[in-house]
Image (cartoon, coloured by chain):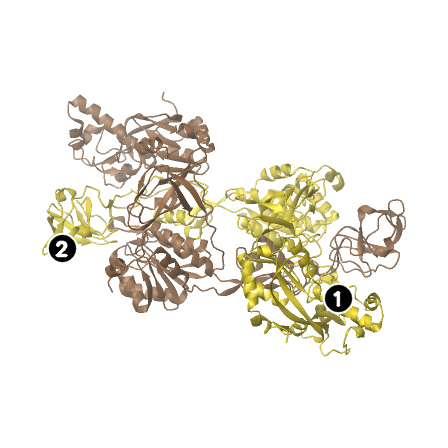
Chain colours: A brown, B yellow
Amino acid sequence: MSDHREFRDLASPADLRETVAALDLGGETERVALRDARGRVLAERIDAALDVPGFDRAAMDGYAVRAEDTVGAGEADPVALAVAGAVHPGEEPDCTVTPGTAVEISTGAVLPPNADAVVMVEDTSETGNGVAVRTAVAPGEHVMTAGADVAAGQRALGPGTRLTPREVGLLSALGVESVPVVAPPVVGIVSTGEELVRPGADLHPEAGQIHDVNSYAIGTAVEAAGGEPSYYPHVGDDEAALESCLVDAAEECDLVLSSGSTSAGAIDVVHRVIERRGDLLLHGVAVKPGKPTLVGRIGGAAYVGLPGYPVSALTIFRRFVAPAVRDAAGLPDARTASVTAEMAVRERFGEGRHRLVPVGLVDDGEGTLLAYSVDKGSGATTTLVDADGVVDVGPDTDYRSPGEDVSVALFSPDVRPPRALVVGEDDPVLSRVLDDIERPRFLARGSRGGARWLRDGIADVAVVAGPGTLEGDTTELGRWHREWGLVVPAGNPDDVRGPLDLVNEDRRFANRDGESGLRASFDALLGTLSEEREEGNESLAASIEGYEVETHASESPARRVAAGAADAGLGLRATATRLDLGFVSLGTETVRVLANPCRTGKPAVSALGQQIEDIEGVTDEVPGYVASPE
Amino acid sequence: MSDHREFRDLASPADLRETVAALDLGGETERVALRDARGRVLAERIDAALDVPGFDRAAMDGYAVRAEDTVGAGEADPVALAVAGAVHPGEEPDCTVTPGTAVEISTGAVLPPNADAVVMVEDTSETGNGVAVRTAVAPGEHVMTAGADVAAGQRALGPGTRLTPREVGLLSALGVESVPVVAPPVVGIVSTGEELVRPGADLHPEAGQIHDVNSYAIGTAVEAAGGEPSYYPHVGDDEAALESCLVDAAEECDLVLSSGSTSAGAIDVVHRVIERRGDLLLHGVAVKPGKPTLVGRIGGAAYVGLPGYPVSALTIFRRFVAPAVRDAAGLPDARTASVTAEMAVRERFGEGRHRLVPVGLVDDGEGTLLAYSVDKGSGATTTLVDADGVVDVGPDTDYRSPGEDVSVALFSPDVRPPRALVVGEDDPVLSRVLDDIERPRFLARGSRGGARWLRDGIADVAVVAGPGTLEGDTTELGRWHREWGLVVPAGNPDDVRGPLDLVNEDRRFANRDGESGLRASFDALLGTLSEEREEGNESLAASIEGYEVETHASESPARRVAAGAADAGLGLRATATRLDLGFVSLGTETVRVLANPCRTGKPAVSALGQQIEDIEGVTDEVPGYVASPE
């Protein structure tokens, strides 16, 4: 059965959900100590094995009495009783209450024999040889009788109860030291792909290696769903090795999850292994992302093959697999946490399949949530943290218009939109300022990106550097100034003095992308130089080797220089200093922090403005930065 | 400074909150492995240390090309390119793309030198000696350039970020193996009281011992707030021992919590220790429960003394202390989870102090939540699990009327009202039936209690046993029958044959309380016997020693017999069999399960009805029970 044939007949999302729900994911019972039982789920009913309290117990400080001895007592007519002794908590009474006597008693102490009530100390007075009782009490008054809280044999907690501090309290009262709880389903995590390297291990990007994102991300999601992740070593695309890994995992786990095989060939391998060593129940789902999802069984374990890209793998896990893990762990369904938001701008999705589109959220300052796409495509991992939830888009929907209401399924009920959405130029001073703001989201989209997101009414704040003006109303929260130029190897071995030294000199240059303010400053300088040389700007740029190499962040060109991949890079003095590189200053540019005027009332936006008022404290610490130009 | 003087000048709840919030509870930094970082909070900003991807990466399966070589290509005019090799994920390219050539490439593989775009395999055809490209591609098409996802030096995650699977994914991509996170504040848990015994240890109720409820309940609540509990051995009221324990705990912890000293004397001891070894900041709060709350410092640690009763201790901890622990742990404020409910019946509170009243909730079947008091008073631990939240009642409010709206602060956002509120007779068959219902709440209030709660419109379902009829409309969900009588020691050594053997025979009897159906059956039998003997019912009862001993559950009298504290007890054949005791049958009574007719549409109520339709499966397993009388 070929991969391509399978994919022509895609299962529906509902089929996927049902197929996963029908898998057997364990649900064994284990015992845990009560003190470690928080969040666990009782596997069995617990009946009280003893009375609570275990004895008739004084509920007040005062005197244990025979109620009949207090009949008629009042403020005006106190009854005098002899005091036969005292009993305190944790003591066995060594006295009894005979007619006409009382025993001093503390809250929590055992009611002595023959006593049937307690008179509060406030209603008594000590006398020379006893106590005067100034109120009558009924039998049982201020006494908690044995078993009145819970009696032995009573149902205390039912199976399926999730243990919070309150249940732990009741079980403590019952003397329970350990409890039978639902064992978490053990979920084997297998990442496939020759290119994967576990975080922390050496990475060789030149050999196409990337860090394995799915293992810990999916494993952490398994934990969040009440399962216990078990990590297996990576396997490549070798069929025998993969088969052996999956079969081993199936023996040790209730569920095996694999992911990472983004290429069709690797999926074919997994597909064949499952068909040979288990049952293939479903392959290919009409949902994007998620098309290559596989469901089956290997040996005694359930198996789900997730897509390879992290956002896809986590989306499919969360939507379709996590509910089954929760169910096996005895946890209630996750609270559905959805919010309604308005599309900020028109988004095209393309028709044909049900889409799960990750979106970010921002409050427009008047209580309306706006949804915006954050996906940089092709397995971008920043989408993981820049998005707040997922919008379902049906197969017949081609696009969503600005202002259209969409329902956003939050990644979890804990997700809250950022307090401030800041978009624009990446900048080391900005990074420090953002550290002191509660829950900002910063999207590094360059100065031009920031300006666009502000103009489109999505960003609360844009950060723009270099030349260029912004259309429309903005409120400047503040500004600072940074020295820019060419970052060169330490000691400037080629004796580069400016852009002209890059022209026709066989120097390899590393540039920034066209969205960045640094690039705009550089291009403006090239324009001036061209005029001086009476040449077209383009020909000057075209004469710089590497001018078209566009890198994505303020440190990227400098890092190329540090790595020996370039002889000069566009960058900041701050970066050159930080990376111990040489620096050729070409000027100072202004970094402006501009707010949408309708959003200045948002607390995090005004907090940002306040931080910038004291920007000198930060700029003084970063080389090449000043709060105000001299 | 005497305790009594302090208490006259009680702090306000707002003072308590502010005083606790001003304490220093730690907030150190520690490193944890990324795979164990779920739920932790970043202590520092994390900038990307490398580019993701680390190389220009194919985003599709196909052919790596020089975009300029595809200019003009189309379905009708394919461009023919020679294939110079292939590159797969995790491989270093061993070929370059020269003009007129292409290199086969898999998704995720390194773009070979000189290539600047990828043509999707779908847009190509293999030819005898190369590949026909049927579409033109632009430079960068289907390529993710190095650093396009995250570039080295960019801000990745800010301090204060809570790590979910998504952040763990991004950090994995960045190769981060361990992360600096906020260390949980260490909270020492000290329980004081001579009477306390840790769960699992031997309990001597005759000496007034009770299990320590607060340690694990508060410790678990500390965990839920992001703290790390550290348990200390109990101390009694001995001042030197308590002082030494508190001082030790203060050296090892950020915050020390004590509780358990319910008596005024013990509080005085703690008070003196804090004054001597630290600072007493606040003592006595105008809130009920919580009056004896103490706040201060011992050595370098913060100190809070909680009230002794578990419900009180947990209420004060949750309301006033947990927010400070969360803050020190770097967690966001707990989501306020409040629901509006109607008071089910009139509740008197008494004026004078702000009250935090625990209430249970139930849906009235039409979407309105009803709130009801569940407190059995005087430190009852069942209140912990029978309540769903707390109603704040101001000092000037004496009572709340039925139908009045109240705001209920749920114990946590996870709390959901029970799906079925069942009140009435405790019964072993009922217990088993409830095990198969999702999230029921059963309150053992006896048959009379059940009838009352049903009549008052609180209970969904009442369980009533024995004689007596219910006023008003009810819907019977089902019934079963149980054999009742006298439980006696094994072998019935006294040869008891019936109630008359208990009269004037010097036998010690153990009775049930007046709310129970068993008691009603017994009293009815005594009435019949009295008539036969032509005596008043009361005199017959009065002649039974222990008739007035009221115990609280179906097994309680039998357990008194088993313990040698009674010679005969009112009970069930099921209990006698279970406890290996003798049994003298006195009859069979019917257990009826009656629903509020407005609540039969609640899924859990109808599920209960369905379970009872098959009650034979349960009654067959319990001695003395039948589904239908013969």
Question: Percent from the top left, x then y, of residue B487?
Answer: 72, 72
Front-most of B376 and A189?
B376
In the rendered image, residues at marks 1 and 2 fall on the same chain: yes
Q: Is residue B524 above or below residue A319?
A: below
N-terminal-most mark, 1 or 2 = 2
Q: Dot 1: what SS? A: strand
Q: Secondary structure at mark 2?
A: strand
In the displayed image of the protein, which residue is found farthest to the front? B473
Return the x and y of residue B240 as percentages of the image width and height. Answer: 71, 49
Judge whether A31 appears above or below B49 on screen.
below
Chain for disc number 1? B
Tell me which residue sits at (21%, 23%) in the image. Answer: A528
**Quadrant in which the N terminus of chain A appears:** bottom left
Q: Nearer the viewer, residue B549 or A66?
A: B549
Whether residue B171 is visible here, answered yes or no, is yes
Left or right: residue B300 compared with residue A72: left
**Residue B577, disc:** none
Contact (Cβ within 8 Å) of mark 1 with mark 2: no
Q: Is residue A388 visible?
A: no
Q: Quadrant of the C terminus of chain A?
A: top left
Q: Residue at x 18, y 46 (%)?
A: B113
Provide residue B593's location: percent of width, then percent of height: 62, 63
Quadrant in which residue A110 is drawn: bottom right
Which of the 4 image quadrants contains residue B409? top right
Name the residue type under label 1.
Asn
Residue wearing tag 1: B511
Could you say which quadrant of the image residue B515 lies in?
bottom right
Whole-angstrom CA distance, mark 1 to mark 2, is 93 Å
Residue depicted at x 18% and y 25%: A530
Residue farthest to the top, as pictured = A630
Which residue is label 2 attached to? B126
